[in-house]
Structures are given as structure tokens and as C-alpha cells.
Amino acid sequence: MNIISKKMTSVLTGVAVYYPLNTGNTWTYKMKDGTTYTNSVIGVGLVNRSEFIMANSHANTMVKIRKEENFYLTTSYEAEKFLLFLKDDMITGENWSIIFNANGFENILIVTVKQTGLTKEVEGRLYKDIVQLEAESRINMNGQMIAFGFFTQYYYAKGIGLILTTSSMGDEHALISYELK
């Protein structure tokens, strides 16, 4: 499916989207060890108004996120390579792959929609209309697909964005505050 070459319009904010994109939006997370960090939308593309620049205060990095129709693409996996990481119209059981190069290896995340329409409490706040994604990490080494048994769970609430990230290693990044413009 070549979603990047289509001419598209996108809904960028509001209750119908899993990741509201607008300059000035911020999401602050608390990690399991108590450390906090903020993801911020700090700019918009000059040519493509559906392309945003995001900053992460903990990693001190900037990435691009682009919205094309119901598809969210990011350069966070591999510089300047837009890869699908989220959609607004998901159904339970659906999956897709994120394939990127890092540390000299081809990495694959197999993303599966585990549940939709969830209600979940995170840091004392109740969120509704949540989708739970699970990503399995694999690597292609010498032509052999190697599964690590490492899974990451992402919880997105419609109209708000990413509210919780957990992993099979016990990691947790919980949304503690957000501001949407």
C-alpha cells in the first residue's frame, strides 16, 4: 500500500483522532523511576501543513510526524524516513510492520491492535475510547528473523494522544499532564 504518494487531507485535532497535532500541544509523562519528560509539537511544515516537528525533553531529540488521511507517519525510527506508527481507523486484530535500520541491522516491529474502545485509569485520571497496540521487536540478522520476546504496549486515547506505554521488561511511561491547543 503506497499511502505516501496520495494527495490527502487530514483531520489533525479533535475527539476523532488518536494523536491531536497542533503547534503548542504538549504531553508530560512519568517513567517508572519517577523521572518526567515532555513531548511537544514545536513547529509545522512550511510546505506540508500536515507535517509537524516534535521535541522530546528527555532524549533531547526532534522528529517529524506527518498525518495523511487516517495515517500517522514518523521519522522517530529512522532519520528522514517516514514510517507508519498509528492510524485513526483501527480494528482489533489488525497488524502492520515498521521496518527500519538501526545499529547496522534491519529492525522490525510487528504492531498489532490488541483492543479498541477501552476505558483505562492512568495516574488517577480516567480515559475513554482507547486503543491498545502491542509491538513485538524483531531483528533481521544474516537473513534470519530473530524474535527477542520483547513487547511494548501503547495506549492512545481519542482526542488526547498517547496516555501510557508499558513493556514486557516492566517499563512504564504514564501521562501525567497534557495541553492541547
Image: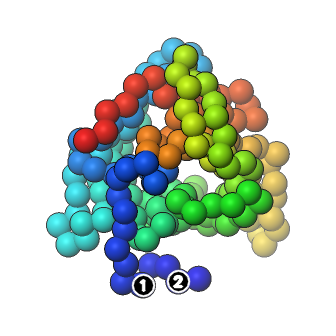
User: For the point 43% across and 48% down, which residue is it?
Assistant: 15
Q: What percent of the width, then of the height, locates residue 164?
A: 57, 34
Q: Quadrant of the N terminus?
A: bottom right
Question: Badge 1: how crowded within 10 Å, few (<14), some, or many (20+)?
Answer: few
Figure quadrant of residue 27: top left
User: For the point 81% across and 58% down, which residue is it?
Assistant: 146
Residue 119 lies left or right of residue 77; in this view the side is right
- The front one of 149 and 40 is 40
Instruction: Please indicate, yes or no, whether residue 72 appears anywhere in the rendered image.
Output: yes
Q: Is residue 49 above or below residue 18?
A: below
Give residue 28's mark. none
Q: Secondary structure at mark 1?
A: loop
Figure quadrant of residue 102: bottom right
Task: Give me the C-alpha separation between circle 1 and circle 2.
Answer: 6 Å
Residue 124 lies left or right of residue 179; in this view the side is right
Question: Badge 2: how crowded within 10 Å, few (<14), some, or many (20+)?
Answer: few
Instruction: Please indicate, yes or no, whether residue 139 appears anywhere in the rendered image.
Output: no
Q: Which residue is mark 2?
A: 2
Q: Amino acid at mark 1?
A: Ser
- The front one of 103 and 25 is 25
User: For the point 70% across and 55% down, which residue is it?
Assistant: 113
Q: What percent of the width, then of the height, locates residue 160?
A: 44, 41
Q: What percent of the width, then of the height, locates residue 153?
A: 67, 41
The extreme left residue here reads 46
Q: What percent of the width, then of the height, locates residue 49?
A: 24, 66
- The front one of 33 and 164 is 164
Q: Which residue is mark 1?
A: 5
User: For the point 34% across and 74% down, which residue is it?
Assistant: 9
